[in-house]
């Protein structure tokens, strides 16, 4: 996976989790990102606006996806209806596709807020985090094999 896609995924994860974390008293992910790459107050405000712009729609889509997944699970039975399963699966695919599109659009908008230097810093920090995760996984594998 390209580093830029990895970073994009991380940005999306950070931005999508902001409302849930804020409600639970967890650290503010935009503030953490600001500290990580040195975002200005204006940049933070702009990113929060981008997130607010799509968070309601994403929440509704996630709820729809969950309902469709439950509908699919309910169809798994001896007297199954293939047409119904396929219909629910198609709807689920459409909803998850829309979630992916909105997430990518949000990611692109957030990325446009960063300066080149901030992107470089984020790239560097993400590489470090990825290396730490790889080392941690290798250590766990070594411990499990002993």
Image (tube, helix red, strand yellow):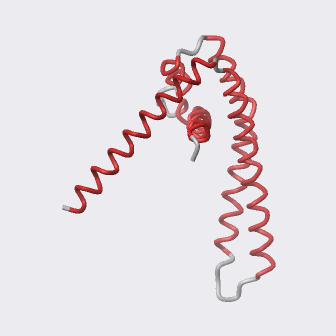
Looking at the image, is 61 positioned above or below residue 50? Answer: below
Point out the residue furthest to the bottom here.
78
Q: Nearer the viewer, residue 42 or 120?
A: 120
Q: Which quadrant holds residue 73? A: bottom right
Nearest to the observer: residue 43 or residue 135: 135
Judge whether 72 appears above or below 83 on screen. above
Q: Is residue 44 left or right of residue 109?
A: left
| Residue found 32% across the figure and 45% down from its top | 136
For residue 129, side relative to residue 8 (left or right): left
Q: In this rendering, would 74 be left or right of 135?
A: right
Q: Residue furthest top?
A: 41
Q: Residue at x 78, y 66 (%)?
A: 90
- Which is more toward the observer, 107 or 6? 6
Q: Nearer the viewer, residue 82 or 108?
A: 108
Q: Residue at x 42, y 36 (%)?
A: 129
Establish if 27 lies above or below 34: below
> Looking at the picture, how far across and down is residue 60, in whole percent?
73, 46
- Image spot of residue 109 (x, y percent): 73, 28
Instruction: Tell me the quarter of the picture where residue 128 sits.
Output: top left
Q: Quadrant of the C terminus?
A: bottom left
């Amino acid at each position: 996976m390209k580093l830029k896609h990895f970073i994009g995924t991380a940005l999306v994860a950070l931005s999508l989790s902001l409302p849930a974390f804020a409600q639970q008293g967890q650290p503010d992910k935009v503030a953490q990102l600001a500290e990580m790459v040195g975002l200005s107050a204006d940049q933070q405000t702009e990113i929060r606006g981008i997130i607010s712009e799509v968070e309601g729609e994403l929440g509704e889509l996630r709820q729809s996806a969950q309902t469709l997944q439950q509908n699919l699970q309910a169809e798994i039975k001896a007297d199954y209806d293939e047409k119904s399963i396929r219909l629910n699966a198609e709807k689920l695919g459409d909803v998850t596709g829309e979630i992916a599109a909105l997430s990518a659009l949000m990611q692109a908008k957030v990325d446009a807020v960063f300066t080149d230097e901030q992107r470089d810093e984020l790239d560097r920090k993400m590489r470090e985090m990825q290396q730490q995760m790889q080392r941690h996984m290798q250590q766990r594998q070594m411990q499990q094999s002993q």
